[in-house]
Structures are given as structure tokens and as C-alpha cells.
């Protein structure tokens, strides 16, 4: 499946990807997708915090672990004040959990609908699913992605608890990076695999998944560097600077998601074309 490709084929894939990315207005698609992600982010945060709060809010140490998990998953400089007030959210998790679930259900179905339309566009699918079937797939993918998110959150918290209570010498940073990379790869695979109306080839699927996961993981260092350079803007925008950095992060995530999908589609197209020539 992962056959080595020559430099010439790599150039063809890269050239075709860049051309198709801009011809289908990739930056414009990313801006719309980033807006949907922003609407979905806040209720998702409330839902996850309230869910973990039922089992982890019994001690100050447990709350600190949840805070550490959320701060590690969010980009540097964009953490909301809700993380700093996790104790208050955990104490009122019944109210926040209900509100978060209702908002999350409403906004997430719309978000996954946008993801479905974006992937249909970049994969050049001419016959999309019917309205009701598309909404059903959106709901199914939403449930799988939510379960994956809760699973990874619980696993990260469990690893942190084991390290702090039993004194097991686990390399915290390395384990956190591995868990984050696996989560991102699994989420991207889920979206690229089930959201489009038609399946792409295995080569294109894995190319898009691994490209997106690696770029998003590398972006943590790049985004951290950008935050350090743009630190002066925090004086100008004050408390809004974290929100502005989060918007920029979500736009970058959307760009990477679309570009990785285009790269996977181009790799699949070129591989199919070469096979037909042979």
C-alpha cells in the first residue's frame, strides 16, 4: 500500500494538488468550515468537561489533570477562560452538560454537513447523497467522532492519574504526543472515509490521513512560534487575543484538512492514471 514514489511522481502530486486547491477556492472553503468549527467548539468543550467531571471532579488533583489535558489539546495562547474556571463548570456540570449537549447536537450536525459538502467538492463527486441519507450519515459520523474524542480524553486522563498516583515513570510529553497523533489520525480517517458520498482509494485515503495528522502535529510548534512573535497584539486586543488566536488556529486546521484531502485525491488520481497507462 505504501509503495515508494519517485521524486518525479511527488512533483506531479504536489503540482496537481496546489493547482486543484486554488482552482476550487480552497481558502474560501476553509473560512466557511472554520466558522462552523468555531460554533461547534464551545458546546463541545462544555460537553466534554461536564462528562469528565462526573468521574474526575472529586478532587483538586483530578481537576488539574483535566485542565492539563484541555490545555495540551488547544493551541498555545488560545485557551479560553473556561479552562481556568473548570471547578465552577464541574460543580454545575448538570446544567452545562444539558446545555452543551443540546447546542452540540444542533451545531455538530451542521458542521459535519459542511465537512461532507467540502469533501464532495475536493473529491469531485458529482452525485451527492440525498438529504435524509446525508443527515443520517452526518449523525452517525458525529456519534463516532464524539465517542473517539471522549475515549482519547479519558485515556489521557487515565495515563496522567497513573503517573501521578502510582509513580510509574511514563514519559509524559512523549505519551501525550503519541495519543494526540493517534487521535488526529483516527479522526481524519473517519472523516475522509465516511463523510464523502463516494469512497476514495486506499492510497488516497491513507495519504490524506497521514498528511493531515503530521501537518497538524507539526503546527503546534509553528503556531507556538507565531504566538511568541505576535505577543504584542495581546496588549492591543487584551482578553480578546486568545479568541483571535483560536479563530486563526481553526482556520489553519481547516486549511490543512482541505489541502490534505486534495493531496490524497491527487495521489489517488495519478496512481490510477499511471496504472491505466501500464
Image: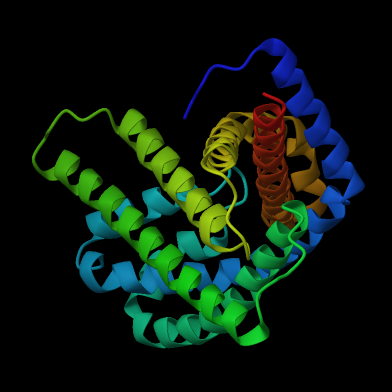
Res. 4 in view? yes
Residue in view at x 18 percent, y 39 percent? 163
Residue in view at x 61 percent, y 69 percent? 112
Q: Quadrant of residue 201?
A: top right
Q: Quadrant of residue 11?
A: top right
Q: Is residue 156 above or below residue 212?
A: below
Res. 88 in view? no
Residue in view at x 47 percent, y 59 percent? 84
Residue in view at x 91 percent, y 46 percent? 23
Q: Is residue 42 left or right of residue 130?
A: left
Picture coordinates of residue 265 (x, y %)? 68, 42
Picture coordinates of residue 262 (x, y %)? 72, 43
Q: Is residue 259 above or below residue 50?
A: above
53, 139: nearer the viewer: 139
Picture coordinates of residue 157 (x, y %)? 27, 52
Q: Residue furthest left?
A: 166
Q: Residue furthest top?
A: 7
Picture coordinates of residue 45 (x, y %)? 49, 67
Q: How many marks?
A: 0
Image quarter (top left, top right, bottom left or bottom right) of the C terminus: top right
Q: Is residue 56 above or below residue 100?
A: above
| Display colour scheme | rainbow
Q: Is residue 255 left or right of residue 22?
A: left
109, 238: nearer the viewer: 109
Q: Is residue 146 above or below residue 124?
A: below
Amino acid at each position: 500500500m505504501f509503495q515508494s514514489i519517485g521524486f518525479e511522481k511527488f512533483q506531479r502530486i504536489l503540482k496537481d494538488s496546489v493547482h486543484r486547491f486554488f482552482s476550487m477556492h480552497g481558502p474560501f472553503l476553509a473560512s466557511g468550515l472554520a466558522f462552523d468549527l468555531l460554533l461547534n467548539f464551545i458546546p463541545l468543550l462544555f460537553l466534554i468537561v461536564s462528562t469528565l467531571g462526573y468521574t474526575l471532579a472529586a478532587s483538586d488533583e483530578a481537576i488539574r489533570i483535566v485542565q492539563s489535558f484541555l490545555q495540551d489539546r488547544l493551541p498555545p495562547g488560545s485557551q479560553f477562560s473556561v479552562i481556568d474556571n473548570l471547578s465552577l463548570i464541574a460543580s454545575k456540570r448538570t446544567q452545562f452538560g444539558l446545555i452543551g449537549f443540546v447546542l452540540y447536537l444542533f451545531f455538530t450536525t451542521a458542521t459535519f454537513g459542511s465537512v461532507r459538502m467540502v469533501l464532495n467538492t475536493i473529491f469531485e463527486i458529482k452525485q451527492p447523497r440525498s438529504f435524509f441519507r446525508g443527515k443520517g450519515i452526518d449523525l452517525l459520523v458525529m456519534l463516532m467522532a464524539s465517542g473517539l474524542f471522549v475515549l482519547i480524553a479519558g485515556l489521557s486522563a487515565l495515563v496522567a492519574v497513573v503517573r501521578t498516583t502510582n509513580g510509574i515513570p511514563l514519559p509524559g510529553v512523549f505519551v501525550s504526543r503519541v495519543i494526540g497523533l493517534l487521535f488526529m489520525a483516527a479522526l481524519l480517517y473517519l472523516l475522509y472515509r465516511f463523510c464523502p458520498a463516494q469512497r476514495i482509494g486506499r492510497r488516497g485515503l491513507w495519504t490524506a490521513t497521514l498528511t493531515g495528522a503530521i501537518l497538524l502535529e507539526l503546527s503546534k510548534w509553528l503556531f507556538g512560534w507565531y504566538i511568541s512573535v505576535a505577543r504584542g497584539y495581546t496588549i492591543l486586543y487584551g482578553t480578546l487575543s486568545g479568541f483571535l488566536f483560536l479563530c486563526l488556529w481553526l482556520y489553519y486546521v481547516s486549511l490543512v484538512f482541505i489541502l490534505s484531502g486534495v493531496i490524497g485525491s491527487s495521489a489517488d488520481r495519478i496512481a490510477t492514471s499511471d496504472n491505466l497507462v501500464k
